[in-house]
Image (spheres, grey):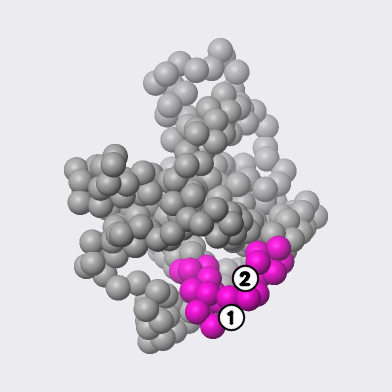
Amino acid sequence: MATKKPISFKAIFYTTISLVWIFGLSAIGHIVMVLIEKYNPGIKYDFAWTSALVGFFAIYSTRFMKSDGWQSFIGCLGGLGLWFAFEYSLMYGGHRLGVTYTWNGSYPEYRMMKWTFMLLIMVFVYLLFQESVRCNFIFFLRRKLRLMRGAIATGKISNYGPRTAFEYIMVTWTFYVMLMIGYDEELFGAHSWFIYVLFFASFSVFFYLCYKLLGYDRFGANLRYAIPTVTILWNDIEILAKWGMLKEPWVHINWTIMSVIIAGFVISTYLIVKDLRRRKDGMIESKDIT
């Protein structure tokens, strides 16, 4: 487990850039999918296969990287590529099965995703008992439920790339399933107590995670911890859009807002890459958070 350090301006800088980059990565993922669907839907499944291959080879390339910062950075991109492929596979399955939009606007692929909840639970149960998984939330559940029999994770991690990609996929998958179950009118509904609790819990936890994130001052750890931090806030964006209180710029093709998001992503990418290139010690961080 990582040791908390006093908050510094350096940590604030790394935290801010990491949050902007992860948020931009998720937003651009939405932008790309909407633009393809709107202007050239015929290429979407070719794009899905390409994304899967690029994602796999991106993760494989981390095998040859010494820096945990580069491993985490490329791992995020690899996770996004595989997530693209997963969403498009559900889109294809929904098309084949004739799944339609719901009255409250849920896309067919997300309606399909809702029913992967049991698969998600099976994967999560495995992670609970896998000693090498160092997610803080899983650590908490292990302690409270007394799941382990004395075994603890030991030793350094030599490659954060696959872990970061898997973290991106699992966190995104978990919260999408949670939202889709919450939106289901036969279970809860978009204006149910469940969605209101999720909204306020996500908003509160986001600030707590930002505070925790300020304890890290290198892009490797910051990027990994920024994934759940941003994704939890993304719950509120999705819920506000569902309530009709927010118009998602990637859905309504608001180029002004999308340009700001893209610019923020490009600038944060430049700063991250510049910092990673400057570090030539080749050391792997001993602190771990995922």
Q: Do the residues labelled 2 and 1 touch (CB within 8 Å)?
A: yes
Give x and y (percent) for residue 208.
Answer: 32, 48
- Residue position for label 2: 44
Q: Which of 74 and 30 is in front in this view?
A: 30
Give x and y (percent) for residue 181.
Answer: 36, 44
What's under tag 1, amino acid-wise? Answer: Asn
**Which stretch did the figure color magenta?**
27-50
Q: In this view, does 187 lie to the left or right of 100?
A: left
- Residue position for label 1: 40
What's under tag 2, amino acid-wise? Answer: Lys
Give x and y (percent) for residue 232.
Answer: 37, 52
Q: In this view, does 281 lie to the left or right of 35?
A: right
Is 44 contained in the magenta span?
A: yes
Q: Residue at x 30, y 73 (%)?
A: 247
- Residue 95 in view in this figure: yes
Q: Which residue is drawn at 44% across and 84% down?
A: 259
Q: Which of 20 and 55 is in front in this view?
A: 55
Look at the magenta stretch and give its main secondary structure.
helix
